[in-house]
Amino acid sequence: MLDFTRQYAVIREEVLEAIESVCASQKFILGPAVSSFESAAAAACAATAGIGCASGTDALWLAMAGAGVGPGDRVVTTPFSFFATASAILRCGATPVFADIDPATFNLSSAAVEAAIRDSAGAVKAILPVHLYGQCANLDALKGFGASLIEDAAQAFGARWNGTPAGSLGDAAAFSFYPTKNLSAFGDAGLVTTSDPAIDDRCRLLRAHGMRQRYIHEEIGWNSRLDSIQAAVLEVKLRYLPQWNAARRERAAAYDRLFRRTGLADGTVVLPFTDPRAEHVFHQYVVRVPRRDSLRQFLTDRKIGTEIYYPIPLHLQSSLDFLGCKRGDFPVAEQATAEVLALPMYPELREDEQETVVHAIAEFYS
């Protein structure tokens, strides 16, 4: 699915030099390297502020808490996402309200959001769309509901919607730099972006135990500080990200071309759809296929890596039973969980390797 060594071979000297600089400075937590990366990342997202933190999950919580989401509030989001999307809402003391997805993009359906808000038992404080697989959700359609917009952009650094970068499409955004992401750390790390000074200020307060001055705690926050080594690595990688994302789009186009050449795209394999308003960064290349689990085993037997993002929708996770959802509530998301399959995707993937993947899939369906 992913080969880290190819990327590291290209940037090794720059990364080691950046790490050595931090080690020489002995400033390991929220030091100059963090401030430098925060500024560079915010600029890349066309936001005025970036707030580094310990993980993408913490970034989601900070972004919502910074925007005033708290106990008793309701937040509309998708059931087709990683668990952190829902758990971060609950960590704020708020309640997730799920809305179904668009079958083409897998992102939140604005019509479903409208219905969820109309049917909600209480006022909706925020909408949390996920830019799934690296394609921005339709923020234009979500701005008219009178709620705060918090982007779950964990998979979408560098993506754009109508020319505007992810990270500046809503009131605040949360990014993950987990090692598999397009922009990835050498461990866990996250970032909140915003152009709202009040959100910026509160996120910085909350990530450091609610302190502005040492040992004076204005409120109960959390320890979610970005360490300087991760920031230094990320700033090196940030300089390469535009070309890496362009390479991902090239690899996606190559997959499309290869699948069409086999004839599979005429009905057996549903290729990823890119909205013409979006600049997709293909964190994942995800197809819809029949007999998905059997195909996956077939590919595994041939040493071809695949993954399922995600096999169980959030509303059917046993830990969220208390929300009262049941099978059938969000049929589009449920169908997606049975059909989606992510194929190998990274900038250094070679076309002959892609041919191997596509030929194997063609063999399965022949």
Image (cartoon, rainbow, N blue to C red):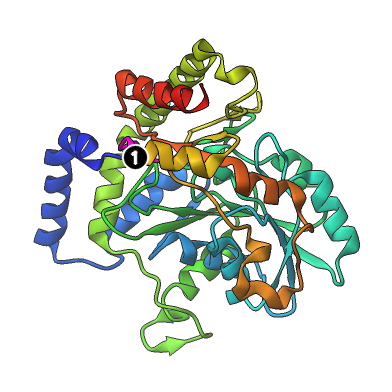
For residue 10, above or below residue 266? below
Residue 222 image offset from top left, x and y in percent = 45, 78
Amino acid type indicated by mark 1 = Asp
**Residue located beneath label 1 in the image:** 301
Figure quadrant of residue 128: bottom right
Asked whether the viewer can see residue 342, the reply is: yes
Q: Residue at x 49, y 75 (%)?
A: 206
Q: Secondary structure at mark 1?
A: helix
Magenta region, residue range: 301-306
Q: Does 96 sit left or right of 117 as displayed?
A: left
Magenta segment's dominant SS is: loop
Front residue of 102 and 239? 102
Q: Does 267 sit left or right of 225 as displayed?
A: right
Confirm whether the magenta stretch covers residue 89.
no
Q: Residue at x 70, y 39 (%)?
A: 138
Q: Residue at x 71, y 38 (%)?
A: 103
Residue 112 image offset from top left, x and y in percent = 81, 49
Q: Does 92 sit left or right of 77 as displayed?
A: left
